[in-house]
Amino acid sequence: MTKDKKPGVRGQGRTTREDWLNIALDTLISEGVDQVKVLTLANKLDCARSSFYWYFKDRGELLDALIDHWANTNTRALVEAASQPAETVCYALGNLYASWVKRDKFDTKLDFAIREWARRSGTVRRALDVSEGARLEAIAAMFRRYDYDYSEADVRARIVYFTQIGYATKDEHESWELRISRGRDYLYCMTGRRPTDAEIQALANAVLPDPEPKRSPTPKAAAR
């Protein structure tokens, strides 16, 4: 007599590598790396623990995949944004700020989770140092394209980057209207150049959050 399969268990045929990676990312962000364990993740996915090994050799390989995902999303987003062509440095800075606030580009909570992990792991600390070096160099190169000398570009890159990281850490609960009202002075302080009205408007357009997707009306609502 065969045993009935536990209801809701996905099994390795239905649980994908992306499922494991996504639940590991969620757990890293909400609970920390110590809770990124195969059994814990399997319970959350409601699947057999053995299905994990179809996609990862061991827990260490999963942790490496988390670091790779972070570098290929957060760091890439900033580097690509800083490298975008723009007519002026103020337009370029608007592109960079947009990459920080758009939900599909830079994951602030994941960045903080990696930083917390790096406090206890030399390997992750080294990965963070390499990543931050790439970010800072990309921003400095952005300034150099607009005729800032090497030293000034380096310092301005650090001011822009570490100000944004600190701002996110403080988790200011400001309205977007208030943030945008400060745009003219932010651009001037970060670049040393007076922005035009067009550059200020471009910044506002770039950093406004994406609108929440509209829900389709329910059948009852649609029939009314």
Image (cartoon, rainbow, N blue to C red):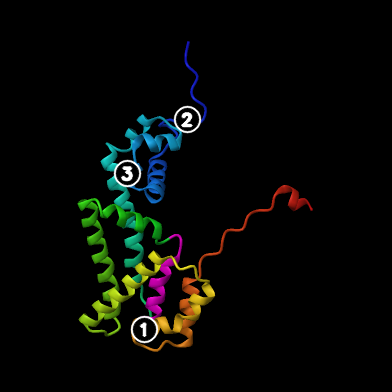
Q: Position of residue 210 (x, y in %)?
A: 52, 65
Q: CA distance from mark 3 to mark 1?
A: 41 Å
- Label 3 SS: helix
Q: CA distance from mark 2 to mark 1?
A: 56 Å
Which residue is located at x 37 percent, y 31 percent?
49
> Where's residue 37, x and y in %?
34, 39
Against 194, residue 171 (above or below) is above
**Mark linked to residue 34:** 3
| Left/right of residue 147 with respect to residue 24 in the rendered view | left
Q: Residue at x 50, y 80 (%)?
A: 181
Classify residue 23 by image quadrant. Answer: top left
Residue segment shown in magenta? 89-104
Point out which mark residue 178 bears. none
The amino acid type of the residue labelled 2 equals Val
- First along the sequence among labels 2 and 1: 2
- Residue 176 vs 40, above or below: the answer is below
* Mark sitting on residue 189: 1
Q: Secondary structure at mark 1?
A: helix
Q: Nearer the viewer, mark 3 or mark 2?
A: 3
Q: Main secondary structure of the magenta part?
A: helix
Q: Which residue is mark 2?
A: 9
Residue for point 40% across, 29% down: 48
In the displayed structure image, the side of residue 208 where residue 185 appears, left or right: left
